Image (cartoon, helix red, strand yellow):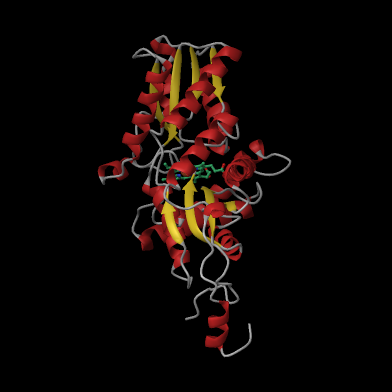
Amino acid sequence: MQFKGAVNFRHDQPGKIGILITNLGTPDAPTPSALRRYLGEFLADPRVVEVPRPIWWLILNGIILRIRPRRSAEAYRKVWQEDGSPLLIHTVNQCEAIRKELQARHGKDIVVAYAMRYGNPGIASALDDLQKQGVRKLLVLPLYPQYSASTSASTFDAIAADFTQRRWLPDFRFVSHYHDYPPYIEAMASHIEAHWQAHGRNQKLVFSYHGVPLKYLKRGDPYHCECHKTSRLLAERLGLADGAWITTFQSRFGREEWLQPYTDATLKAMPDEGVESVDVFCPGFSSDCLETIEEINEENREYFMAAGGKAFSYITALNSEPGHIQALVSLVEDNLQGWQMPDNQPETLALTAERARALGSGV
Ligand SMILES: C=CC1=C(C)c2cc3[nH]c(cc4nc(cc5[nH]c(cc1n2)c(C)c5CCC(=O)O)C(CCC(=O)O)=C4C)c(C)c3C=C
Ligand SMILES: [Fe+2]
Ligand SMILES: [Fe+2]
């Protein structure tokens, strides 16, 4: 076994700090074949679907990958932009804005890159690139505010799997969640208030989060609790009365029970219960993507209006807005505590001559 290594590394260069921002990933194109590749990788992850492997392999390859890619490609076509998938575009923009701010504060030797857990650009190629740039201290920030084994732990697995192939591991830190981080709560609250200023305010505010199977909560996943805590902190910060807001879960997949209440069923029932106008915000999505643009702002809007609703206002994700970027930069800085910034680092020992001697050659 040959481990991956930087063969011609230099001992006398101070290591850089690398920040790797990750998100879920998205297909390369809104086509059935690209969806088959993307869903094939995503849904084969045992962190995402906790069904015994041989049974799941048969269901995934025999049924799901024959039907779902075509249906999902249609949905992706509705949200696809000239430069590609919204999730990827927002992640690139967030990465650039975070890099700009961090380099302005700490100098050019802080390296910021992005990667997707599934699809492209992948985690292995981003880590190769960071290693080539001399990163010796690595902070990974998955853009999942609430921890779930299906997202945060899956990202950790991918990093750890890559590390098993590498010779020289960096110092390593991992942000597993930030669901109650005050600057993140503040950024969302200010964003919602700005939306109300511009578009007016409706009767009820729905906080809709991506769901997970109920059995994950029963097996000890803290995701459900973290979503509720984010909502409570937001409601407190916004001064909302009980009954003026609700937490719901969207994006159900398959037949088993997922976290309740479901966003679609809740919105369908609201007009009969006297709620005729809603604002909907998705605090778990750091970027707008298929699940917010198509599922919430199109599909669920239609359900609500068809059930007798009079007004449905979707509040966009934080995307690259300055308050979000400032919150993420603070989160990164808090997690870098104790690591010397590259511009403050003493030179490492100049071992070049000794290394040359050990190799039995000139420098
Ligand atoms: C099969 C089970 C799924 C689990 C569990 C799950 C958890 C989960 N997902 C997100 C965030 C996103 N999911 C997105 C798309 C998406 N999710 C699933 C399935 C599960 N997700 C599927 C099959 C898909 C693909 C679309 C489809 O075919 O319906 C996205 C959007 C990606 C994009 O390209 O825009 C995001 C983001 C979280 C946060 C989460 C658990 C907490
Ligand atoms: Fe999902
Ligand atoms: Fe969906």
**Residue plotted at (35% across, 42% down):** 213
Q: Is residue 124 left or right of residue 31?
A: left
| Figure quadrant of residue 126 | bottom right
Up-down relation of residue 331 to residue 245 (above or below): below
Q: Name the residue nearer the viewer: 319 or 30.
A: 319
Q: Position of residue 333 (x, y in %)?
A: 48, 43
| Residue beneath the point at 51% across and 70% down | 349
The residue lying furthest to the right in this view is: 82
The answer to whether residue 130 is seen in the rendering is yes
Query: Could you tell me which quadrant the C terminus lies in?
Result: bottom right
Image coords of residue 359 (percent x, y) = 55, 87
Q: Nearer the viewer, residue 11 or 71?
A: 11
Tell me which corner region of the image, top left, top right, bottom left or bottom right, holds residue 195: top right
Q: How many marks?
A: 0
Q: Nearer the viewer, residue 333 or 202?
A: 333
Is residue 328 or residue 272 the one in the foreground?
Answer: 328
Give the farthest residue toward the bottom: 360
Residue at the far top in the pictured view:
274
Q: Position of residue 255 (x, y in %)?
A: 38, 42
Looking at the rendering, which quadrant does residue 131 occupy?
bottom right
Give the residue drawn at x 46%, y 35%. Answer: 284
State left or right for residue 2 relative to residue 99.
left
The reply, left or right, for residue 129 in relation to residue 223 is right
Above or below for 247 versus 363:
above
- In the image, residue 34 sits, relative to residue 78, either above or below, namely below
Say if residue 59 shows up in the picture. Answer: no
Residue 184 rendering spot, x and y as whole percentages: 46, 32
